[in-house]
Amino acid sequence: MRNTLVAGVRTFILVPLLFLLTVVYSLFIISYGMVRPASPLHGRIVKRWSRTFLRVPPVTFEVEGLEHVDPETRYVVVANHLSTFDIPLMLWVLPVEGRFLSKKELFRIPVVGRAMRRVGIISIDRQAGRSSRSVINEGVQLAAERGYSLIVFPEGTRSRADDLLPFKKGAFRIAIDTKLPILPVIIEGTDRISRPGSKLFFRGHAQVRVLEPIETAELTNRDDLTALMRSVEASIAQGYNELHTPS
């Protein structure tokens, strides 16, 4: 009961403040971006925003496997998806400039949506199916040219049980199309912070495990796509089961 009360107070006080900060950052990004569209300052703002988001519940975390990450390399980062906090957690802890795919509806938010485009977040139309593939690849290529890695959750939505949802092929198709290496990442614990069916954010601890990257330069969608997806899915599922303690 006490934990719920504390979570309620922190959520209803700090979340509006976080949104206000988001608007302020967005206005700065839009105005400054007119002069310097690909400024490194955008990345620092994204990192700072992510760290602030994690302080709302607050979230503590531990990370292992960062030795597998080359900060100078662009990746397609592939991770399991448990909660709203997965994105700021990944943006903060990985030593790369990460961007992610976001449903097009979020880009309709005044000011914030425009800032999202400015910093390189890629819009995706979930209803467009295969017709959106070329648009996504163009966005990924532009992000890579600016030095950004792409963060993708191949389950497509948050899993709401102890088992992960089946992976979809999109992230792996993107990696093969763009010849970017895949960086598999396991996330555990964020579902206890943002709980299914609850609008409150609870204090909690998350774990992140980074696996060895997988090169895709010699792979093709025709011959290797399914095997690549299944291999990464199995590795992430195995690691998640090792880290996860059922609630």
Image: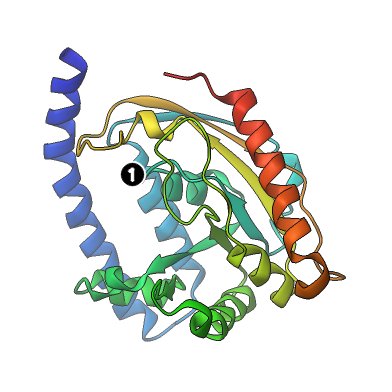
Residue at (64, 24) in percent of width and height: 242
Query: Residue 84 vs residue 210: left or right?
Result: left
Label 1 sits on residue: 52
Residue at image point 55% right, 58% down: 151
Total tally of numbered discs in the picture? 1
Picture quadrant of residue 177: bottom right
Which quadrant does the C terminus fall into? top left
**Residue 190 relative to residue 239: left or right:** left
Residue 179 on image: x %, y %: 76, 72
Q: Quadrant of residue 142?
A: bottom right
Which residue type does callout 1 highlight? Thr
SS at circle 1: helix
In the figure, 222 relative to 78: above or below?
below
Q: Residue at x 18, y 21 (%)?
A: 4
Q: Which x, y percent locates residue 82? A: 44, 41
Horizontally, residue 24 falls left or right of residue 129, namely: left
Taking the image as shown, residue 102 lies to the left or right of residue 111, namely right
Q: Which of 228 and 216 is in front in this view?
A: 228
Residue 50 picture location, percent across and down: 39, 49
How crowded pointer 1 is (Cα within 10 Å; few <14, some 14-19, many 20+) is rated as some
Which quadrant holds the N terminus?
A: top left
- From the viewer's side, name the closer residue of 237 and 85: 237
x, y percentage for residue 75? 67, 61
Q: Which residue is drawn at 61% across and 50% down?
A: 95
